[in-house]
Amino acid sequence: MARYTGPANKLFRNYGVKDLSARKLTSSMTQYASGQHGQNRKKVSEYALQLKEKQKIRLTYLVSEKQFHKYYEKANRKTGVTGTILLQMLETRLDNVLFRAGFSVTRRQSRQLVGHGHILVNGKKVDIPSYILKEGDEIKVRAKSSQVFKDIIEMVDQAQAPAWISVDAENQTIKVERLPEREEIDPEFKEQLIIEFYSK
């Protein structure tokens, strides 16, 4: 993807993106947009709100514009609530599941760990961060990478892992028990704005 290499804090201030540079945002981080006129109150159009929400979700999961649009088209073809299906696809990406399970400190780190071939899915090496996991899939750290992950796991609280995955920190395995429910995904996401954005 066309990687964003600029200041991560600026993304939070402009779009409300979380979990990009750290698991917990500092209370001192300003809440208004970056730049000289960031505090100015402006009347925001409906289109601007939709675009901002799309950018917030896209940048949270570190997905390119082209890739995000493909996710939307795929979700739109499936039976069910398009917005929920879209978020489920993003949540069940391999890099995101590693992050959610506490096997990486940031999503950027989990992308790197997957890309370097440290992960097995159902016993086979997978080095594609965007790999979509299914119910019943098991993720395991390769034996030669065990120490790398042991150091990371000790830094992160695995108790924060969502209920739709089971985590065995000692054996360095993760199992996808089921797809996440909408209530288990970030409540601040307004996926309906994404649907409206692409429906024009």
Image (cartoon, rainbow, N blue to C red):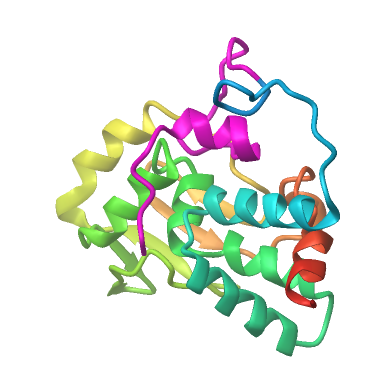
Residue 171 drawn above or below residue 18 = below
Residue 157 visible: no
**Percent position (x, y) of residue 105?**
41, 35
Left or right position of 82 against 71: right
**Percent position (x, y) of residue 147?**
20, 39
Q: Which of 74 and 79 is in front in this view?
A: 74
State which quarter of the image contains the C terminus: bottom right
Magenta-colored stretch includes residue 170: no
Residue 168 visible: yes
Quarter-of-image position of residue 181? bottom right
Left or right position of 14 against 151: right
Residue 55 drawn above or below residue 127 = above
**Percent position (x, y) of residue 194?**
75, 64
Question: Who's the residue at 64% across and 25% down the image?
Answer: 38
Q: How many marks?
A: 0
Quarter-of-image position of residue 125? bottom left
Farthest residue to the left: give it: 144
Left or right position of 81 against 167: right
Magenta stretch?
Answer: 1-30
Question: Who's the residue at 63% across and 53% down the image?
Answer: 57
Question: Who's the residue at 60% across and 59% down the image?
Answer: 91
Farthest residue to the top: give it: 28
State which quarter of the image contains the N terminus: bottom left
Q: Which of 53 and 118 is in front in this view?
A: 53
